[in-house]
Image (tube, rainbow, N blue to C red):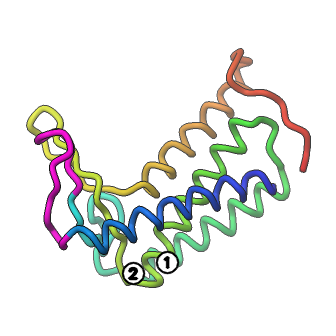
Amino acid sequence: MRKILGVGLIAFVIDQIVKLVINTMVSLERSISVLGDFFQITYVRNYGAAFNILTGNRFFLILIACMTLFLLLFFLRKEGVKTKVEQIGYGLFIGGIVGNLWDRLIYGYVIDYLDFELFHIHMPIFNLADVCICFGVCLCIYALLKEEFGWKSLSKKVAKD
């Protein structure tokens, strides 16, 4: 559990440092081109969840994040993890949830800034915490499928903390 929380803490701290830099160096709703139209840094405030769904439901989103963290930590305490991939996955998932939860609690909104356009389609703007959540969940699903179907590689067994 310590390694999972360590990964989560690292993800949270990096997320908050980047958001602090964005908040202080980029004007609200302004863009900085990184790779032409493909990738820009654009500072926006997200008062909802992904794709701005549930906009204006701050307390509901805080409740959902807290419940998810509680259930996840309860599950991890009860079941434990078997591989390093799971440790990293759960750590990133927790760090990402806490990063966006922190924003909602402190600012009342989530700071988003990663802005991509693919094939002339402007994608929703997101942040590092969102990336950690998605990547963490993907790693956990991979580990689950690997165990279920006996896939080889990537996952090494770990000793209990």
Q: Callout 2: helix, strand or loop?
A: helix
Q: Which residue is mark 2?
A: 58
Q: Residue at the spot x=20%, y=49% of the render? A: 40
Q: Is residue 92 left or right of residue 132?
A: right
Q: In the rendered structure, are the residues bearing label 2 and label 1 in contact, judged by CB atoms less than 8 Å apart?
A: yes
Residue 60 locus on image (x, y percent)? 45, 79
Tally of numbered discs: 2
- Which one is nearer the viewer's eye here, 30 or 68? 30
Instruction: List the single residue furthest toward the left.
Output: 120
Q: Residues within 10 Å of mark 1 (few under 14, many from 20)?
A: some
Over which residues does the magenta segment extend? 27-41
Instruction: List the single residue furthest toward the top.
Output: 152
Q: Is residue 36 magenta?
A: yes
Q: Quadrant of residue 78?
A: bottom right
Q: Residues within 10 Å of mark 2 (few under 14, many from 20)?
A: some
Looking at the rendered structure, which numbered label has been put on residue 62?
A: 1
Amino acid type at circle 1 is Ile
Amino acid type at circle 2 is Arg
- Which one is nearer the viewer's eye here, 25 or 75? 25
- Which one is nearer the viewer's eye here, 131 or 14? 14
Q: Is residue 81 left or right of residue 61?
A: right
Q: Is residue 12 magenta?
A: no
